[in-house]
Amino acid sequence: MENITASEVAGFGVGALLLCATIAAPKVDFFIAASQRSSLGLCKRCGDLRMIACPRCKGAGLVRGGPAIFSIFDDINPFASGQAKVGSISCITCQGKGNMSCSECSKSP
Ligand SMILES: [Zn+2]
Ligand SMILES: [Zn+2]
């Protein structure tokens, strides 16, 4: 007997694909923003704000309690978004502040 159904296999495939897209997208954004900022003479990381938005919660100070994969469906499925907000927890990366001091700026005096 097969323990894994076809739909489960498809689910893993789609999940992995979406996960890759989620990981890649912010890096592309960051790269573009960094090149713009350096051409303006601003801090590459924060644009001279001396603070950066927390990469984990994207400045919200809250992260959803569920697996990260669900955040992908927020834009597509309003029901998933509504459910996910119920499970939001304080972000551990920024202690719920939503931002962190810029490591590039704190390096230089
Ligand atoms: Zn955070
Ligand atoms: Zn900076």
Image (cartoon, rainbow, N blue to C red):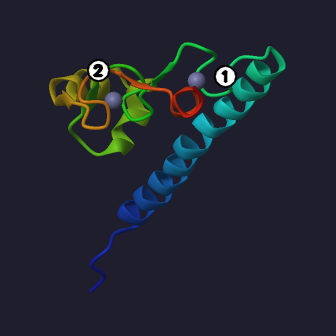
- The answer to whether mark 2 and mark 1 are in CB contact below 8 A is no
Q: Nearer the viewer, residue 30 or 79?
A: 30
Marks 2 and 1: which is nearer the front? 1
Tell me the residue at 65%/31% (across/down). Answer: 30
Where, by quadrant of the figure, is residue 84 drawn? top left
Q: Nearer the viewer, residue 107 or 94?
A: 107
Residue with the mark numbered 2: 97
Amino acid, disc 1: Cys
**Beta carbon at label 1 within 8 Å of ligand 2:** yes
> Residue 32 vs residue 8: left or right?
right
SS of the residue under disc 2? loop
Q: Nearer the viewer, residue 44 or 90?
A: 44
Q: Residues within 10 Å of mark 1 (few under 14, many from 20)?
A: some
Tell me the residue at 36%/62% (across/down). Answer: 8
**Beta carbon at label 2 within 8 Å of ligand 1:** yes
Q: Is residue 95 above or below residue 41?
A: below
- Alpha-carbon distance for marks 2 and 1? 21 Å
Residue with the mark numbered 1: 43
Query: Picture coordinates of residue 9 (x, y %)?
Result: 42, 66
Q: Give the residue at the far bottom of this rendering.
A: 1
**Nearest to N terminus: mark 2 or mark 1:** 1
Tell me the residue at 78%/17% (across/down). Answer: 41
Q: Give the residue at the far right of this rendering.
A: 39
Amino acid, disc 2: Lys
Q: Give the residue at the far front of this rendering.
A: 109
Where, by quadrant of the figure, is residue 4 drawn? bottom left
Query: Picture coordinates of residue 31 (x, y %)?
Result: 71, 34
Picture quarter with the C terminus? top right
Query: Picture coordinates of residue 59 (x, y %)?
Result: 39, 20
